[in-house]
Amino acid sequence: MLVTDDATPLLIKRYASRRLYNTETSDYVTLEDIARFIREGREVQIIDLKSGDDLTRQYLLQIVAEHESRGENVLPINVLTDLVRSYTTQAHSVVPQFLAMSFDMLRDGQSKMMENLGTIPNPMATMPGFDAMQKQQEAFLKAMTGGMGKNWATGPATNDDDEGSAAKSDDLNDIKKQLAELQAKLSKLGE
């Protein structure tokens, strides 16, 4: 199915048989298809063919309920509890605005983060604790080499008396070399 990115919502008509009909592609769709359209960034509008009622909210809630019931929990219990409470309190008028603003902020934050990934020389360097992580990685690599040799990046001082230890030493040196290259790349990213 071809999904377009225009601002016009994708019109889905619900027939009396409760089947959902995509008016753009002239075929029947499922709730999972509608969820996929939305994940791809498309707005949808679901209309009852006979009455003309807008059923979009009802179907979106059904999609959320199905995902939550399958264990794809996005909404914590306390949030669901607060939502239920908001229907019986005066907070009912504030909750929709708060949720809409929160999701707008989340969406904007994600967009800005994705934009910044292309402009920041090293996104990991701005991450809190990056230096500590780098030091832990160095300690881990030193521990992996067993403290052999003075410089963990150049490899251990080995004793190649037999072929088995020579092969193991070569493998270990290859691994150390690869780890050293990765460490050098990470260090460059941190500059």
Image (cartoon, rainbow, N blue to C red):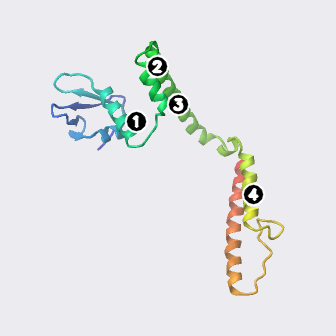
SS type, badge 4:
helix
User: What residue is drawn where x is 46% and y is 19%?
Assistant: 95
x then y, percent, for residue 103 = 49, 28
Q: CA distance from mark 1 to mark 4?
A: 42 Å
Q: Residue 143 is drawn in which quadrant? A: bottom right
Q: Is residue 168 left or right of residue 101?
A: right
SS type, badge 2:
helix
x then y, percent, for residue 145 = 74, 68
SS type, badge 1:
loop
Q: Residue 28 is drawn in which quadrant? A: top left
SS type, badge 3:
helix
Amino acid type indicated by mark 2: Val
x then y, percent, for residue 60 = 34, 31
Q: Earlier in the sequence, mark 1 or mark 3?
A: 1
x then y, percent, for residue 20 = 22, 35
Quadrant of the frame with the N terminus: top left
For mark 3, what is the residue? 106
Amino acid type indicated by mark 3: Leu
Q: Earlier in the sequence, mark 1 or mark 4?
A: 1
For mark 1, what is the residue? 41
Q: Earlier in the sequence, mark 2 or mark 1?
A: 1
The circle drawn on residue 138 is 4
Q: Earlier in the sequence, mark 3 or mark 2?
A: 2
Q: CA distance from mark 2 to mark 4?
A: 48 Å
